[in-house]
Amino acid sequence: MKVRRIVANIETQDAAAARRFYHDVLGLDVLMDQGWIATYGSEEEMQVQISFMAQGGSGTPVPDLSIEVDDVEAALAAMKAAGFVIEYGPADEPWGVRRFYVRDPLGRLVNILSHR
């Protein structure tokens, strides 16, 4: 048996808010939209990972999602321009990432990072 995909399922009644954050600001593609479910993603090949955390590192809370981007500064600027409040960072962490935390409009804490 081989795991082929891991999907994060987040409950919301506000699909438009999710689209604004994940599609409009982060640039994820709409892979599927059935009205009751919208799936965002990318055709890029990605590693399958799932993390179990006691804390978020550097004394931060555990984020609900971690999204690695190719340009953390551009993601930070896009979040600020869209009016999202940065809750942590940007910070260069001792384990080799630059990251910031932002809360999506659904209340989920999102860790946006790039490896240095």
Image (spheres, helix red, strand yellow):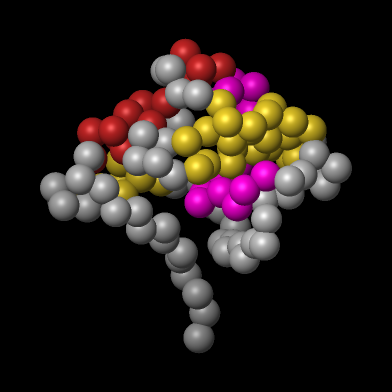
- The residue depicted at 35 percent of the width and 45 percent of the height is 40
- The residue depicted at 47 percent of the width and 36 percent of the height is 103
- The residue depicted at 85 percent of the width and 42 percent of the height is 94
In this rendering, the answer to whether 78 lies above or below 71 is above
Find out whether residue 97 is within the magenta segment.
no
Where is residue 59? Give x, y as percent: 73, 46
Quarter of the rendering containing residue 108: top left
In this rendering, the answer to whether 103 lies above or below 64 is above
In the rendered image, the residue lying farthest to the top is 81
- Depth check: 80 or 34 in front? 80
**Relative horizontal placement of residue 18, taking residue 75 as reference (left or right):** left
**Relative horizontal placement of residue 11, taking residue 113 as reference (left or right):** left
User: For the C terminus, which image quadrant?
Assistant: top right
In the rendered image, the residue lying farthest to the right is 94
**Relative horizontal placement of residue 58, taking residue 80 as reference (left or right):** right
- Depth check: 81 or 54 in front? 54
Where is residue 38? Give x, y as percent: 25, 48
- Is any part of residue 108 visible from this angle? yes
Where is residue 30? Give x, y as percent: 30, 41
Find out whether residue 67 is within the magenta segment.
yes
- Is any part of residue 32 visible from this angle? no
Where is residue 46? Give x, y as percent: 56, 53
- Depth check: 101 or 67 in front? 101
- The residue depicted at 56 percent of the width and 49 percent of the height is 63
Magenta residues? 60-76
